[in-house]
Image: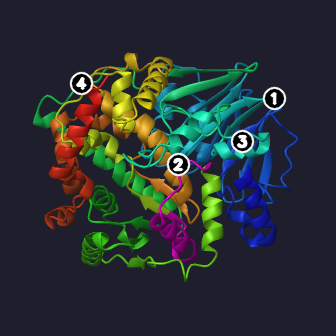
Amino acid sequence: MKMTEQLKTMLEQKKNLRKYLFIRAFLLSDNNDISLDEFPFYGNWKKEKLDDTYYAYVHNTQHIYHVDVDGKTFFLFGHAYNPFTMEIDENKILKRIAEHYNTDTYWDFVDEMTGLFVYGVIDENGVHFINDPSGMQSACYSYINGNFYISSHPQLIGDICHLTMSDTAKEYVAYKWYYRVMGPYLPADLTPFDEVKRIVPDISYTFKDGKITHKRFYPIKTITECKNDEEYQAVIKEAADILKNNMELVSLKWKKPAISLTGGIDSNTTFAAANGIYDRFTAFSYLSAEKESIDVVAAKNIARKFGVKHTVYEIPPTTDTLKNYEEFVEIIDHNNGYVARGNDNEYRKRVYLIEHLDADVEVKSWVSETIRAYWYKHYGRKSMPKLSPKLYRNLYKIFITNRRLAHKTDKLFEQYIKDFEYDKIPEQYPTADIHYNEVTWGSWGGLNISEMKIYADITMIYNNRKFLDLLFRVPLEYRISDQHHLDMKKILNKKLYDMNIRVVNMKETNTRAFLLNVIFTANSILP
């Protein structure tokens, strides 16, 4: 609360920065008494009535779409586009989904959406809601003092309802290894507040009569792994087509889309997917440390080869030239609920890009790690232990010297695994990959993207459930080696493929993976 009061005092003095507080945020609630003129809204929000009970509140930089069909309200916060119908109008996308509501094919049509969003339906049975396939749109829910809330930011609900950070959140944030293994984020579906829970990807939630229930809707059907090269090539071609269509839709949906480009295979493939329409995109890289120079050189060469304007944003090594740096850090920390204090390098990037990024959307290449078998690479493993609370704890953080917190985390994940029906997931979906998608991406990823949105909107062409599901058919060894990514890039842009550019993430080196696996194994053996 002390930090919140300090923030309020600062924003009284620098009113021009108020628009960055919960920028691109949203709120759904049956609370009609929220004042949009005071903290934390400061007149930068608008309100729309969804039905007789619920209201949508959105920051001026955010969007709410809703359509009424047969007495039901279909809504979407954020953005979505459909690579199967080539539709970019969210209202039309919602109407198409509405036509199949309560049918056996309903989820098939929901799964066609790419984007960062929270989607839901209000009907006679309550409010039903999900977030996007990998939780890149951070989202949470709560029922407090007789009012229901869905929001992009737990701290926003905390500010409205005067909540205080839970003792559990404080304990994790204070833990010395909290910032290691994918950076800072809370385990399971925790948020900074006991009263607020994270919306987990692939889970459908329902609120009715003061109660919130949930049910897994994906993945619950078995799939068949590619048996031969013919099947594999068909899968790769279909996946590549989805990416290509998504890039065309991005070019139609935004006026100034910019590809975040490195030498890595993810952004390489994103860039390849824009083949044939490169005149509609720009590209950019940032340079904030010497180790990033190899990525910048690779990105320059790629962009030059295909005539795409490429900008290198050189992040200042100090904060001296960054206007309102300390104030922006205060806002960023508050927006993330004080559970993800960043390092100076990350803050400098965000603050610098607020002023300098020349784009209305960043095309980012996250999410593909889910089907790139990231945890297997990270630990240099060809297999993973079976589903258990201990496995999920080990994939979360290192607790070798703090067994009490390790056991507490085990209990959290034991309940989490039970509540969200992980035992019902077919074996064709490796539990480590599902953990990465629903826990790591859903918590750490969404939190990071919310921070990055302080400088621009963000979209990801990989964030499509049908696309991800398709590539789960690829044999695990192909996914670990990234053969499927290389083959998609070859289809999308053969000339780029032939350049043979691939900068390997320092976190993927064999020596690092070996050492991490030693720690992982020790953490698995210890009681």
Real-space Cα distance between discs 1 and 3? 12 Å
Give the residue pinned by disc 1: 145
- Mark 4: amino acid: Thr
Depth check, front residue: 267 or 158: 158
Q: How far across and how far down the image is residue 138, in percent?
A: 56, 44
Give the residue pinned by disc 4: 224
- Mark 3: amino acid: Ile
Query: Do residues under tags 1 and 3 come within 8 Å of each other at their CB atoms?
Result: no
Q: Is residue 230 visible?
A: yes
Q: Secondary structure at mark 2?
A: helix
Q: How far across and how far down the image is residue 311, in percent?
A: 40, 78
Q: Is residue 114 visible?
A: no
- From the viewer's perspective, tell me whether residue 242 is left or right of residue 6: left
Q: Secondary structure at mark 1?
A: loop
Q: Quadrant of residue 377?
A: top left
Residue 330 colored magenta? Answer: no
Residue 338 colored magenta? Answer: yes
Real-space Cα distance between discs 1 and 2? 26 Å
Among numbered discs 3 and 2, the one appearing first in the sequence: 3
Depth check, front residue: 414 or 156: 414
Report the span colored magenta. 337-361
